[in-house]
Amino acid sequence: MAHAQCASFRENIPAYALGALDADEAAALEAHLRTCDSCTAELADFRAISDALLMAVPPRRPPAAIRQRLQARLPGASLSRRQKTRRLWPSWSFGQFALGMAIVLLVALNVFSLFQIQALQRQQAKFARQIQTGQAAFAMLAYPDTKSIPIGGSNITGTLLLDQEHNSAVLIAWNLPPIADNQTYQIWLIDPKGQRTSAGLFRQEPGQPFASQSIFSTQIISNFTGLGVTVEPAGGSSQPTGSRIFKVDF
């Protein structure tokens, strides 16, 4: 009688040992196994055989592509991808974003203000030179021993105000030829032997029809016999290298 009751369950023991039995039949078999020692022993035999078969086959690592596809189907895969995306793109609060924009704006304003200050300083320096030259010219015109030497040649006109007693001079020139941004006018004092000594650099200011430049020599101007102006590279030269614009004899 007991054998007849176990017959239907024993048919399912091999499938149960391999984990291939459906849920309802597995539940019924498990209930029977709790009261039947014979079927429990037979299940143990089948499990020993199945374990031996598994150990007889060497383990193999699945191909990477198949493994990635299987991992992508796991429930936590989409969550992991979202977490990686959040790490790559950090979330900023509105306050942090506003603070960052304020810092960028402040830096931009500081840079703009620096450029503005530098432009104003250049303008102030230019006006200071012009005022200094104008004051020197007025003072020299008021001095009775000041020589006024005309400048002429190649459409260039002007005057050289020369005060040899006070070792100073002011050059005022009209219609100077235009020069490039990387060039400058350079003044040369000429001694009796024809040697040239630099006496300053100048440029004609944009929008002005003339150029003026004060000349304060470290040497005695009366030791020189003339003055010349050439076009030189920006920053000047140790000796004349460019074309001569004009020459004035004292």
Image (cartoon, rainbow, N blue to C red):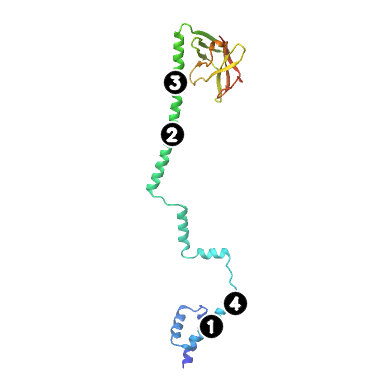
Measured in 3D between alpha carbons, the distance from the residue under mark 1 to the one under mark 2, in whole angstroms, is 86 Å
User: Callout 1: helix, strand or loop?
Assistant: helix
Q: Which of the two discs, 3 and 4, sits closer to the camera?
A: 3
Number of labels in the image equals 4
Residue denoted by label 1: 46
Measured in 3D between alpha carbons, the distance from the residue under mark 3 to the one under mark 4, in whole angstroms, is 101 Å
User: Callout 2: helix, strand or loop?
Assistant: helix
Residue type, label 3: Ala
Q: Which of the two discs, 3 and 1, sits closer to the camera?
A: 3
Q: Which of the two discs, 3 and 2, sits closer to the camera?
A: 3
Q: Which of the two discs, 4 and 1, sits closer to the camera?
A: 4
Residue 68: give its label. none
The percent coordinates of residue 182 (x first, y second) are 56, 25
Up the image or down, 110 lies above or below 76; here it is above
Residue type, label 2: Phe
For label 2, the crowd category at 10 Å Cα-Cα, with few meaning under 14, some 14 to 19 and many 20 or more, is few
Measured in 3D between alpha carbons, the distance from the residue under mark 4 to the one under mark 1, in whole angstroms, is 15 Å
Residue denoted by label 2: 112
Residue denoted by label 4: 56
Residue at image position (39%, 47%) is 96
Q: Earlier in the sequence, mark 3 or mark 4?
A: 4
For label 4, the crowd category at 10 Å Cα-Cα, with few meaning under 14, some 14 to 19 and many 20 or more, is few
The percent coordinates of residue 109 (x first, y second) are 41, 36
Residue type, label 1: Phe
Residue 128: give its label. 3
Measured in 3D between alpha carbons, the distance from the residue under mark 2 to the one under mark 4, in whole angstroms, is 79 Å
Up the image or down, 71 lies above or below 133; here it is below
Mark 3 touching mark 1, by CB under 8 A?
no
Q: Earlier in the sequence, mark 3 or mark 1?
A: 1
Q: What is the quadrant of the C terminus in the image?
A: top right
